Image (spheres, rainbow, N blue to C red):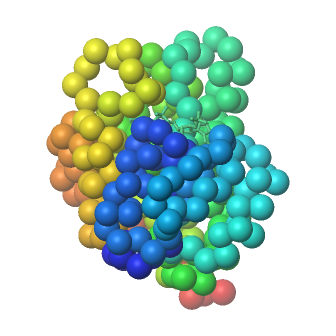
Amino acid sequence: MTIADKAVLVTGANRGIGRALVEEALRRGAKRVYAGTRQPLAHSDGRVTPVTLDVTNAAQTQAAVENVGSLDILINNAGLALVDDLSDPVALQQHLAVNLFGTYGVTQAFLPLLTRSRGAIVNVLSLSALATVPLTPAYAISKAAAFSLSQSLRALLAGRGVTVHAVLPGPVDTDMIRGWDIPKASPESVARAIFDGVDNGEDEIFPDPMSAAMAESWRSGAAKALERQNAALLQAASVEA
Ligand SMILES: NC(=O)c1ccc[n+]([C@@H]2O[C@H](COP(=O)([O-])OP(=O)(O)OC[C@H]3O[C@@H](n4cnc5c(N)ncnc54)[C@H](OP(=O)(O)O)[C@@H]3O)[C@@H](O)[C@H]2O)c1
């Protein structure tokens, strides 16, 4: 899957990693980039089509499907991260609403288009899907759940020719962690690595120096082997049926 001449939708496209993904898609020759945003967006490149899309809003999601018409790559990038301590269930619900159910809802809505194009789903998750950051535990829970969603979709959609890529970034220099005094990758470098990972057919994309240090051990590790073993159960069940 290379991006040239493809139609791409990026959620949360107005700033941070999402904005960098829009620019990188244009640089790589995308035919059309649908920029999903909550507020109106203007872009100087004629290949960019703004799409009003709060990922928690089912009516907006359905309207977006009708506006888009045909799609090769869906990038579920919109995300919410707030500091919490798990004392208030509302914080957990807020994170799940955007990071899990938003990703789920947008994916399900665009699935007919992606199946038609034998396209790709790219879920921008976080390294905290694999190991929690206890400053933002509700965020980590939502990203872990979205990681599991990505694994299941990968197995369930393989037979329809749709690939599912889970992006697991470490810290990136955006508004999300503006106040955190730690080394951060640039959103532009992360966007480049995400498209390289999709081009290379990587299930998990580790797009920055911190996460890249885990890539090899993850790919050759017991958890990845178990995912493949479990996915084979689905194939065996469909052969028997
Ligand atoms: N920055 C990091 O260190 C880091 C690390 C790992 C993973 N990530 C992930 O990368 C993705 C992008 O984050 P970022 O760093 O670029 O953060 P950001 O600068 O805070 O941008 C977040 C984006 O998500 C959008 N968004 C939030 N809630 C939404 C909703 N309900 N519907 C539609 N859009 C919504 C925001 O739109 P508004 O402008 O309207 O609020 C904004 O465009 C997120 O999924 C995040 O979890 C980030």
Q: In the picture shown, does residue 82 fall above or below 46?
A: above
Count of marks overlaid on the render: 0
Residue furthest to the front in view is 44
Provide residue 14's location: percent of width, then percent of height: 52, 43
Q: Give coordinates of residue 38: x percent, y percent.
A: 66, 42
Q: What residue is shown at x 59% (from left), y 47% (from top)?
A: 41
Residue name at image x 56 percent, y 32 percent: 80
Foreground pick, 136 / 240: 136
Which quadrant is the C terminus positioned in?
bottom right
Q: In the displayed structure, would residue 115 be above or below residue 180?
A: below
In the displayed image of the protein, which residue is found farthest to the right?
Answer: 59
Query: Horizontally, is 96 left or right of 72 in the view?
Result: right
Left or right: 66, with 35 as reference point: right
| Of residues 200 and 215, the one drawn nearer to the viewer in this rendering | 200
* Quarter of the view holding residue 160: bottom right
Residue at left offset 27%, top offset 38%: 186
Instruction: Pinpoint residue 235: horizontal percent, then vertical percent.
Output: 52, 79
The answer to whether residue 127 is above or below residue 150 is: above
Q: Would residue 101 be found to the left or right of residue 239 on screen?
A: right
Residue 179 showing in the rendered view = yes
Hey, which quadrant is residue 85 in on the image?
top right
At x 60%, y 84%, the residue is: 116
Q: Position of residue 183 (x, y in %)?
A: 22, 25
Foreground of the two, 19 or 108: 19
Quadrant of the drawing holding the N terminus: bottom left
Whether residue 218 is visible here, answered yes or no, is no
